[in-house]
Amino acid sequence: MAVTKTLTVRKRYDQVIDYVVDTNKTNPLNNNNNYVSNNQKTNKQELVTCINCFDDNPHHSLIATKKVFHDDKEIVCFHAIQSFLPNELSIELCHQIGIELAQKVWGDRFEVVVATHTDKPHLHNHFVINATSFVDGKRYCNTKADMNHLKDVSDELCRKYHLSVIEEHSYSKSITHKQYHHNKSLRSIIKNDIDIAIQNSVTLTEFYRTLENEGYEITFKNTDISLKHINAKRPVRLKNLGDNYDIETIKQRIISHPIQDYQQQNYFDKHKFDILPFWLLFNVKNNELTRLQKYYLSYLYKFGVIPKKHPVKLTKEMKQDVKYLDMICEHTKFILTSNFTTLEQVKDYKEKQYSKIQELENKKRLIRNKTRRCKDLSLKQQYQEEAKSLTPLIKSLRHDIKTCDAIINRTSILVQQKEKPSKDYTR
């Protein structure tokens, strides 16, 4: 059974060379080339194999490739590990599997150093992969698909040599972070509105009418029914929302409603208000109010002391307008608290906030580098807490920059509208 993982090495260009040539470094995250080719780790020098690079000086090949293609990106190489169970295979077979794995996954485009370590009970292979291709200079990104490909090839080699393989359960197809939030903001709203419409309907016609009242556009095409949300660019078919949302299932869900529960619901229930204290206050006789008392109660009603009828539920358009109004109020408050009088002051403030973000991010990066090198657990935890404390500050500064951009864009639009010539209706 082989387990694989890939680590990203982030160093400056000159620091990477120093870490590679420094024989005193044994940390795999700091000096991968020295780590995987250390004699104490491999016990035998023939357990180190270089693919597409020099055997005696592999790091020189990696550096030369970066110079040829002018690659000065932060990620300089990747460190992959393939680990086996104790006493599962011989040292020679472990190294052979590592060589075949490197050739199949990276050998056609990248320089790779393969080393088999025998210093622990379980044999394991280390791979140092240059992030820059020696063929065309394109970079190895180590995406999720690349990690899955590495695992699949490793499992294929284990089956080839009759080794155990971890069999995973079947899971639903994963989606990206952006797709998750997009689906959550649209599809979940549509499904929730459908559930509410089913609860409030006793017939399929009433179900359609309820969705139309919510602002949906319903399209019938053969046996397919599509709904278009007001904020969606394209309609969504009911059958694509899940097994519980095809038209036949919706019919069954509507029919299965208990009639008694439906009749007991009062959808027009208003909030009650007890007027009796006001009548006792005025010591009203024969249920008659004087003119002054009527004026007093009318003003109480206007000022909201006496509640009005139950407010109507906001439509989606009204919610958007309220959200837009809240944004304008936030921008106005931001301008007043910052004492901005010109648009240039807003732009200068934005540049200052951006500079502060750069300083905090550089400071956070230095702290993370210290954490990565630190071996003292208490000091390492202190570094982590210090880096974590900078996150809210960076988040607040980014919010200010976003607010400045919105103010600048809105101001430019208002200026353009003001400069347009107005129509003369007096002629």
Image: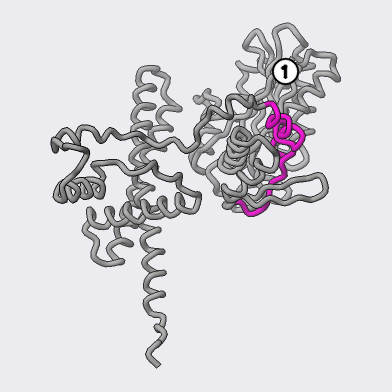
Q: Residue furthest front?
A: 286
Position in image of residue 61 (x %, y %): 65, 41
Position in image of residue 293 (x %, y %): 16, 46
> Left or right: where does residue 359 sit relative to residue 48?
left
Q: Is residue 367 above or below residue 378?
A: below
Q: Would residue 223 be counted in the magenta stretch?
A: no
Task: Name the one closer to the observer, 232 or 365.
Answer: 232
Q: Which residues are magenta?
A: 232-256
> Left or right: where does residue 187 sit relative to residue 17?
right
Position in image of residue 385 (x %, y %): 35, 27
Q: Is residue 144 above or below residue 308?
A: above
Task: Name the one closer to the observer, 301 or 121.
Answer: 301
Q: Would residue 233 be counted in the magenta stretch?
A: yes
The residue carrying mark 1 is 2
Determine whether the residue tagged by mark 1 lies in a helix, strand or loop.
strand
Q: Is residue 16 visible?
A: yes
> Left or right: where does residue 240 sit relative to residue 331?
right
Name the magenta segment's main secondary structure: helix
Quadrant assignment, res 1: top right
Q: Is residue 58 visible?
A: no
Query: Residue at horizontal 61%, vertical 34%?
Result: 195
Q: Amino acid at mark 1?
A: Ala
Query: Residue at horizontal 37%, vertical 48%?
Result: 399
Placement of the C terminus among the 4 image quadrants: bottom left
Position in image of residue 193 (x %, y %): 59, 39
Task: Name the one closer to the observer, 102 or 238.
Answer: 238
Q: Is residue 79 above or below residue 184?
A: above
Colour mapping used in the image: one colour
Mark 1: give few (<14), some (14-19) or many (20+) Cα within 10 Å: many
